[in-house]
Image: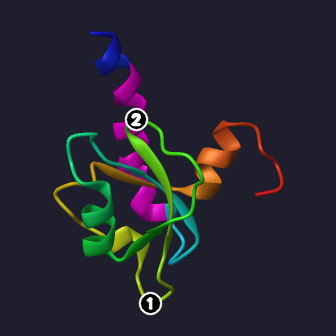
């Protein structure tokens, strides 16, 4: 129950993500821990940029030729704009 309460806001944010996303830049990829993250990121054309991984999330950078709004991979549950995540976390110079 608590897990679903934690994930629900992410699903709402990911629905609005496509409308305001940039074509490149940092993003937060939500990937379940039972998927091979390195393989999933490589398949999607994303590069990990974070020094530490969270259980479900990893900060990534996309190849400039990739539009983040069009990245679709079965292993990536959501791909959120890094600026949105920075704003939620209170970072004002992102």
Q: Residue at x 37, y 39 (%)?
A: 56
Q: The residue tagged with tag 2: helix, strand or loop?
A: loop
Tell me where residue 89 appears, x and y as whole percent.
68, 37
Q: Where is mark 1, residue-wise?
A: 65
Q: Where is mark 2, residue-wise?
A: 55
Q: Residue at x 40, y 22 (%)?
A: 6
Quarter location, residue 66 = bottom left
Q: Badges 1 and 2: C-beta atoms under 8 Å apart?
A: no
The residue lying furthest to the bottom in this view is 65
| SS assignment for the magenta stretch, majority | helix
Quarter of the image with the C terminus is bottom right
* Horizontal side, residue 84 vs residue 19: left or right: right
Nearer the observer, 12 or 45:
45
Q: With respect to residue 25, does 38 lie above or below? A: above
Q: Is residue 13 magenta?
A: yes
Quarter location, residue 87 = top right
């Amino acid at each position: 129950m608590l897990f679903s309460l934690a994930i629900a806001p992410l699903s709402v944010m990911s629905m609005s993500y496509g409308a305001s996303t940039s074509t490149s830049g940092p993003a937060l990829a939500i990937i379940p821990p039972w998927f091979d993250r390195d393989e999933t990121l490589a398949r999607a054309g994303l590069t990990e940029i974070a020094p530490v991984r969270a259980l479900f999330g990893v900060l990534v950078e996309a190849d400039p030729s990739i539009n983040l709004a069009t990245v679709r991979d079965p292993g990536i549950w959501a791909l959120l704009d890094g600026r949105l995540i920075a704003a939620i976390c209170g970072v004002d110079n992102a």
